[in-house]
Image (cartoon, rainbow, N blue to C red):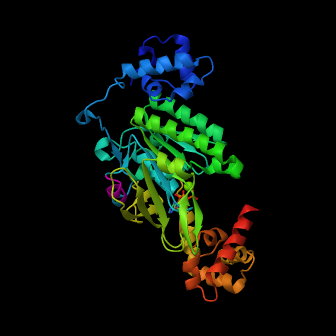
Amino acid sequence: MADLSQIKGINARQIKLLQDNGISTAEALAMSPGSIVSDIDGLGDKTAKKLIWNARNALGMTDFIQAKDIDENVEFMTTGSSELNKILGGGFQTGKLTEVYGPFKSGKTALAHTISVTSQLSVKNGGLNTSVAYIDTENTFSKEKIKRIAKRFGLNPNETLSRIYHARIYSSDHQSQMIQKAETLCKTRGVRLIIIDSLMALLRAEYVGISKLAPRQALLNNIIHTLSRIAETYNCAVLLTNQVAVKMMGMFSTNDAIGGNIVAHGCHFRIMFKTKGFSSNNSLKRRAVIVDAPDLPPEECEFFITSAGIADTDKVEIPESPGLEFEVETLYEEKDETSSDVNNDSESVSKQVSLVSVKGIGKGTAEGLHALGISSIDELVVADPGDLSAKLSGASTSKVLEWQKNAKGLLKT
Ligand SMILES: Nc1ncnc2c1ncn2[C@@H]1O[C@H](COP(=O)(O)OP(=O)(O)OP(=O)(O)O)[C@@H](O)[C@H]1O
Ligand SMILES: [Mg+2]
C-alpha cells in the first residue's frame, strides 16, 4: 500500500482533503472516479485529474500488462460449512463483493457472525488472521453469538470481540459515512473483512415510491463502487446481505433480491439462501445456491444454522473454556419444547389469532395453514401460492394471493 505523500506533485493540504473524504492511499486515489475526486470541496477539477493520473502512473496502472503477470492473490476463509465452502470454490473470498440474499430467517446474519469469527483464525486453520468491520443496519449483532462461535473454533471469545469493529447504523447517509470509515480501518487496523448486514434495509425504508428510485439507485451505485474499490485495494472480503421481495409472474412467485441491477451487476458473487420447504420454524437446515459467480458452476448445497454459527450438521459442540462462561441463549431450546404439544399451547393459539386477523382467513383455515407449517403472517406472505393451494383444500391460488395481499396490508400498518 502506498502513501498519498508518494504521489508526484501532491501537497499536505491536498493529502488532508483526500483523507477527510475517505481516500487515504495512493491506490484508493488511483481507483477513484474523477468525478468523485473533483467534487471534493477545495480540490478543483484540474488538480483532481492531475493527482489521479500521477497516482496511476506511480502504481504502474497506465500500462497494459501481460496476462501471465496478473496478480490473483485470492484468499479464503471458511464459512463454517465444508459443503458451502466447496460450492464457493474454497470458502468466502477476498478482493470481491459477495451478496447473500434470502428470505427472513434464512441464515444471512448467521453467516455474517460466523465469518466475523473464522476470518480471525490463522491461515492454517481456514482464516485470514484479520480484524473485521461490521456495519449493522438492523440491530441484529449479538455478542453472545460471537462468543459461542469463537469457542467453537477454539478462539478466546473476548479477544475475538475486540477484533470486531461494530457500527450500528441509523440512516442511509450514516451507512455511506461508515463505509468510508471502514476503509480507514482497513488501512490502520488491518481489517480485511467488511460486513454490511443488511445493505438495503435503510435505503428501502428511506427511499419510498417510484419518484425516489433514481436517487436511491444513485446512492446505491456509489456504495457498491466504493466497496468494490476497497475490496480490490486492500484485498479485503466484503459480505453484503440482502433481503428479497416476492415477485409475481402470473401464477408463480419467486424470491428476488432487492436493489435491482446495480446490486446484481455490482456484486461478483451472488448467493441465494433458502429456507427448507414451507417453514423455517421446523428445521434449521438451509440451502445455498450459487446464482452468479465469475468462475463457479451454478451449484447448490445444504447447511445448518446452529447456536454456534453455520455448520454442516445441527449437532455442533461448543468446547468448554473455564473462566470464560456466559449465558447460552435458550430461545431455540424453548421453542423445541413448546412445539411438542403443537396445537393447544398458548404460542400456537396466538399465532392462529394473528393469521385470523387477515381478511378472508377464518379459524379453520388458520388451523389448516398451521398444519402446513405456516403459523404467522410473515410466513404466509412468503409462501408459494401455487404450492399452498395444492396442499390446502378449498384454497384456490387466487384466494391465496388475495390472503397474501391482505396480509401484506396488515404488515404495513
Ligand atoms: N442460537 C441459535 N440456535 C439455533 N438456531 C438459531 C440460533 N439463533 C438463531 N437461530 C436460527 O437462525 C435463524 C435466523 O437466522 P438469521 O438471523 O441468520 O436469518 P436472516 O437471514 O439474517 O434473517 P433476516 O432477513 O430476518 O435478517 C432462525 O431460523 C433461528 O431459528
Ligand atoms: Mg438478518
Dominant secondary-structure state across the stretch colored magenta: helix
Asked whether, in this view, residue 270 is left or right of residue 90, the answer is right
Q: Give the quarter the ligand 2 occupies.
A: bottom right
* x 64%, y 37%: residue: 174
Extreme-bottom residue of the structure: 393
Residue 190 on the magenta segment? no
From what the image shows, is residue 235 above or below residue 99?
A: above
Percent of width and height locating residue 206: 69, 47
From what the image shows, is residue 68 above or below residue 151?
A: above
Percent of width and height locating residue 223: 55, 39
* x 56%, y 78%: residue: 386
Q: Is residue 81 visible?
A: yes
Quarter of the image for the N terminus: give it: top left
Asked whether, in this view, residue 326 is left or right of residue 6, the answer is right
Quarter of the image for the C terminus: give it: bottom right
Residue 86 on the magenta segment? yes
- Front residue of 270 and 57: 57
- Front residue of 217 and 360: 217
* x 64%, y 67%: residue: 378
From what the image shows, is residue 69 above or below residue 204?
A: above
- Front residue of 195 and 259: 259
Percent of width and height locating residue 169: 63, 42
Q: Is residue 22 visible?
A: no
Extreme-left residue of the structure: 68
- Front residue of 82 and 412: 412
Span colored in magenta? 84-89
Asked whether, in this view, residue 220 is left or right of residue 129, the answer is right
Percent of width and height locating residue 159: 45, 39
* x 51%, y 52%: residue: 145
From what the image shows, is residue 227 above or below residue 397?
A: above
Asked whether, in this view, residue 288 is left or right of residue 175, the answer is left
